[in-house]
Image: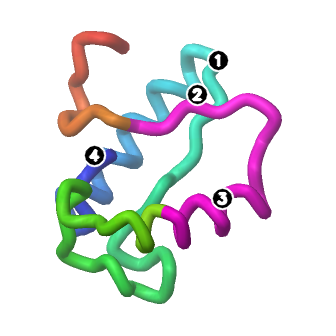
């Protein structure tokens, strides 16, 4: 999961693109604008349990059948 700032949003776009190119169904966990901008400028390690549950509840409403959460912090992740 990328930071919720400009560079993090750019990295998430690149990661999502690469994952989809490899046939994986991935979704955007958060961004600087998602959830009304409530998490703008935040880093994943700062999220509380309550905030994770809020994001999970929102995801469950729009969940694809198979999904992969992005955990990479760089667009050129070696795993891709």
Q: Is residue 63 magenta?
A: yes
Task: Residue lying at the far front in this picture: please name it.
Answer: 49
Q: Residues within 10 Å of mark 1 (few under 14, many from 20)?
A: few
CA separation in Å, label 2 and label 3: 18 Å
Magenta segment boundaries in residue numbering: 53-70
Residue under circle 2?
20
Residue at horizontal 81 percent and vertical 34 percent from the top: 65
| Label 3 element class | helix
In the picture, the quarter occupied by the C terminus is: top left
Residue at horizontal 58 percent and vertical 36 percent from the top: 26
Residue at horizontal 73 percent and vertical 29 percent from the top: 66
Residue under circle 1?
23
| Label 1 element class | loop
In the rendering, at what x and y percent does residue 41 appear?
18, 75
**Residue 11 circle label:** 4
Instruction: Name which of mark 4 and mark 3 comes first in the sequence.
Output: 4
Foreground: disc 2 or disc 3: 3
Q: Is residue 33 magenta?
A: no
Foreground: disc 3 or disc 1: 3
**Residue 59 circle label:** 3
Image height check: is 51 above or below 26? below
| Label 4 element class | helix
Foreground: disc 4 or disc 3: 3
Residue 38: quadrant of the picture = bottom left
Image height check: is 68 above or below 33? above
CA separation in Å, label 2 and label 1: 5 Å
């Amino acid at each position: 999961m990328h930071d919720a700032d400009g560079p993090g949003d750019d990295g998430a776009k690149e990661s999502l693109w690469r994952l989809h190119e490899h046939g994986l169904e991935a979704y955007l966990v958060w961004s600087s604008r998602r959830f009304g901008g409530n998490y703008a400028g935040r880093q994943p390690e700062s999220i509380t349990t309550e905030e994770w549950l809020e994001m999970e509840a929102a995801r469950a409403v729009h969940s694809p059948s198979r999904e992969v959460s992005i955990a990479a912090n760089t667009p050129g992740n070696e795993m891709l």
